[in-house]
Image (cartoon, coloured by chain):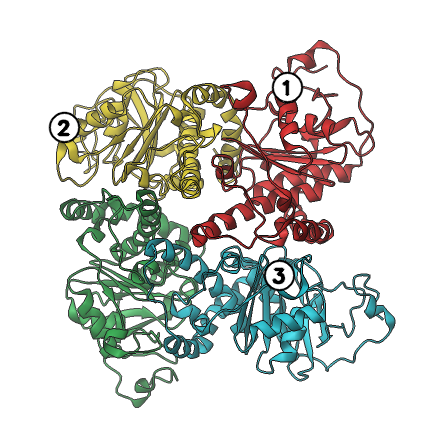
Chain colours: A green, B cyan, C red, D yellow
Amino acid sequence: MFPSPADPRAQSGKAPKSGGPVAAERIADLAAASRILAAQGVVDGFGHVSMRHPSAPERYLMARSIAPALVTPDDIVEYDLDSNPCSASGRGSFLERFIHGEIYKARADVMSVVHSHSPSVIPFGLVRVPMQAMFHNAAFIAAGVPVFDIRDKFGATDMLVGNEEKGVALAEVMGDKDIVLMRAHGSVACGATLQSAVFRAVYTEVNARIQHWTLALAGGASIAALDREEGRLADIVNQAAGMRAWELWRSQVRRQVAW
Amino acid sequence: MFPSPADPRAQSGKAPKSGGPVAAERIADLAAASRILAAQGVVDGFGHVSMRHPSAPERYLMARSIAPALVTPDDIVEYDLDSNPCSASGRGSFLERFIHGEIYKARADVMSVVHSHSPSVIPFGLVRVPMQAMFHNAAFIAAGVPVFDIRDKFGATDMLVGNEEKGVALAEVMGDKDIVLMRAHGSVACGATLQSAVFRAVYTEVNARIQHWTLALAGGASIAALDREEGRLADIVNQAAGMRAWELWRSQVRRQVAW
Amino acid sequence: MFPSPADPRAQSGKAPKSGGPVAAERIADLAAASRILAAQGVVDGFGHVSMRHPSAPERYLMARSIAPALVTPDDIVEYDLDSNPCSASGRGSFLERFIHGEIYKARADVMSVVHSHSPSVIPFGLVRVPMQAMFHNAAFIAAGVPVFDIRDKFGATDMLVGNEEKGVALAEVMGDKDIVLMRAHGSVACGATLQSAVFRAVYTEVNARIQHWTLALAGGASIAALDREEGRLADIVNQAAGMRAWELWRSQVRRQVAW
Amino acid sequence: MFPSPADPRAQSGKAPKSGGPVAAERIADLAAASRILAAQGVVDGFGHVSMRHPSAPERYLMARSIAPALVTPDDIVEYDLDSNPCSASGRGSFLERFIHGEIYKARADVMSVVHSHSPSVIPFGLVRVPMQAMFHNAAFIAAGVPVFDIRDKFGATDMLVGNEEKGVALAEVMGDKDIVLMRAHGSVACGATLQSAVFRAVYTEVNARIQHWTLALAGGASIAALDREEGRLADIVNQAAGMRAWELWRSQVRRQVAW
């Protein structure tokens, strides 16, 4: 039963089956990831982070529709890749959950997705200046940053990726990258682990701030950003070393909650 | 009786009648709105938020003259649309309450008004660069942002909208928009609900920050901001989805106070 | 007796007489002013605020050499206008107390002085772009902002106003204004009350931030800043209305300390 | 025994001898320095500060691999100047400890080293605009700021100074300065005391922010920064006066921990 008024299909009784139980610790980490992104200024009252079901690749987990800083483990809902909740139990779903579902469909290597509207990043979706990797922590950006303009395929809209078709279009523009900007809206960062996706979302925001300052300094001259090979090599290190940042952030959440 | 020395008319004994009782929860929400705007950096020691009386459209409610972060439900005063307090009980009134009264007079659809001096927004009232909607959360800006210059009608002043005449002039410049900038002063954001006005004031500030960065990036090239139709469509969603942000902000105030 | 090693003259036994007792509440307000300036980001580990002795115009009061955020009423020391401590009791003095003493000598109307290195303000002392009043809260700036370059009279120095001669030179450049910038160093803001000097120091910092953004927006076009007459009129209002901000800031200090 | 998997040489049994015991208070200060740098925004989840062993100049002390804000005195490990731990006891080492070891080798006068990725500073390593001293607190910068590009000697890398050879190259570029920027990575600040190195790292970040604003204001005109002699003179004062900032920062750490 899916009594959520925001999700009419969920009320039709065709709820998909669950992919099976998930360890409480992993659910807690996903809830903590929401609070981490809020504490780091990547999300505010809006934005969401998901992870693929650890043992059922055709399912993913994400909070019900709630501000990221308020998420608890009880708010985590399971979805199939069409973004139908397996058991919402009256909990509303994010309008833009299709971002997550369609990326998981298109990209078997992606295990976690963050969608945010971090203010420093938005400008790079509004002008024709490509985001570049300003330092090693944002190395994954050196592979290139595509920009999705919802207007190209859908004309004037409410700007939201609010159905499967729009999610498919977004995933197509992202292609094999782990980041995509959304014109006049926000961005998406992906990773092979929850921790890596969160790390990338945080350092995309930091990188954007650094690039604003650097472009102003450069005054049109070129910037000695990470090149593609430096980016590839540094990103490998980040996958492991990034856990040091995660442990800091996770400990900060633990000081506030019991999970 | 209106013993407030800041409001001589209130001492004349011609106090307007109250529009009737208002639910304690709504008064608490209005007081919370002040603290929310302070916590979000939209107001500092100055600025104010009001709402129209829920059952008496010829009355509005606003805090006595006090810093927004300190407002409690007991500080809320009722005014008529000429901005005379119904019962100040010794509580001083904001010098600029006429901003609120005259907008409520001119615009039957407006139920709440926020006046602030948020630093990122002020520059757009000082130069001839129009504010544009940088992302969907600030969609209401896509309808256009007029600028009120008090000098046009009143010459050199103390810059304050401190009487009815100046309030009328401000409301005229605002016209049918839900925002107006005030040269060398601040801005006003309006909404059909208290929550919507607060949401718009917060995202006007965020939008201004994003636009500063975007214009610097653009270097004179055009910006792919929300167009008017995108703004209209996204603003409809914001009216509902904005409650998610309100619930976050309201919960943060509840952690500090008992109301 | 003045055993402070930082103040050799104080050890000579020629300590000036005190101007008499000062109400504990006023001393507490001065100590609170230090903490307010730290909380508002105007000072960090450095910077100082003083007030003229309420009943002895030839004396002033200022904290011993200590970080502003740590000042307590017991740290307040009395000085004569040559900046000799009346009774330091082993407490060290700020090297730059001559800023305060020499301004009090030169300007009978000044009752309080703030010296700070607030980061947004420093740029205006390094280039030939005059600071202008961007909004009514910074109205006092509309009278003009002189820049003191210590190099003009003293050649290469450690940049500090560390003796009477340098203090005199700074006060001369300030003239009849209530603000002076110091090249590659910081600034000074003055007022007819402690509260007014603090208010002006805070809004000088805010104004500087707004002007950076505004100049970037303007791209060389003119800025509709407060003109001199608007500045004069708005500053009169600020003297009274500024107390609303003071009451907020003072209450925030009271939440941390018992005085 | 050095069971740390991150440090294979440590497992070979060739652990260098300790330089002898260090006073608990000094170890606590080093741990506090990490937290100070985090609180001041100089480091985030990454970055590290070390000090030379007080009585054994061929040894230095630094935290195990952990986020700076989490460091406690128990996390401090002793290293020889080849950056081998004397007794890691299962504690992992920072990949980039060679920055510290090789600077201590090359520069007998350096007693403390801070490595950070502070966002405001990174732009100056990406473009050909030299960092200048914007105010007296950053006086040491007036001596000049070299930029190390790891690509010059090592081609495409993971950007990390992860072995002795790279540490040597970095120390060579730094030369007799107390600061070096690292292209697309971060920076290093040194001092004759732990307190001085921390002070310089903090004010390098503040100075970078001020310079961004100043360059934007200047619009190509020259900036009246500290000249070399002013920088030399002001830096002497900073060595002593900087303790006032340290005492503030140290007291803030003491409010959180028992050491």
Residue located 80% across and 29% down the image: C57
Can residue C32 be seen here? The reply is yes
Same-subunit check for callouts 2 and 1: no
Q: Distance between the Cα atoms at labels 3 and 2?
A: 67 Å
Residue hosting label 2: D12
| Secondary structure at numbered mark 3 | loop
Q: Residue furthest bottom?
A: A12
State whether residue D99 is above or below residue B107.
above
Q: Are marks 1 and 3 in contact (CB under 8 Å)?
A: no
* Image position, residue D206 (x, y; %): 44, 37
Label 1 or label 3, whichever lies nearer to me, is: 1
User: Residue pushed farthest right?
Assistant: B12
Q: Work out whether disc 1 and disc 3 sit on a shared chain.
A: no
**x and y percentages locating residue A237 in the rendered image:** 19, 45
User: Looking at the figure, which quarter contains the N terminus of chain B?
Assistant: bottom right
In percent of width and height, residue A150 lies at 27, 73
Asked if the residue at tag 2 contacts the one at tag 3, i.e. Cβ–Cβ closer than 8 Å, the answer is no
Question: In the depicted view, which residue is nearer to us: D194 or C26?
Answer: C26
* B229 over C250 or under it: above or below: below
Choose top left, top right, bottom left or bottom right for residue C59.
top right
Query: Label 2 to label 1, Cα distance in Å?
Result: 66 Å
Image x and y of residue B61, in percent: 68, 73
Chain designation of label 1? C
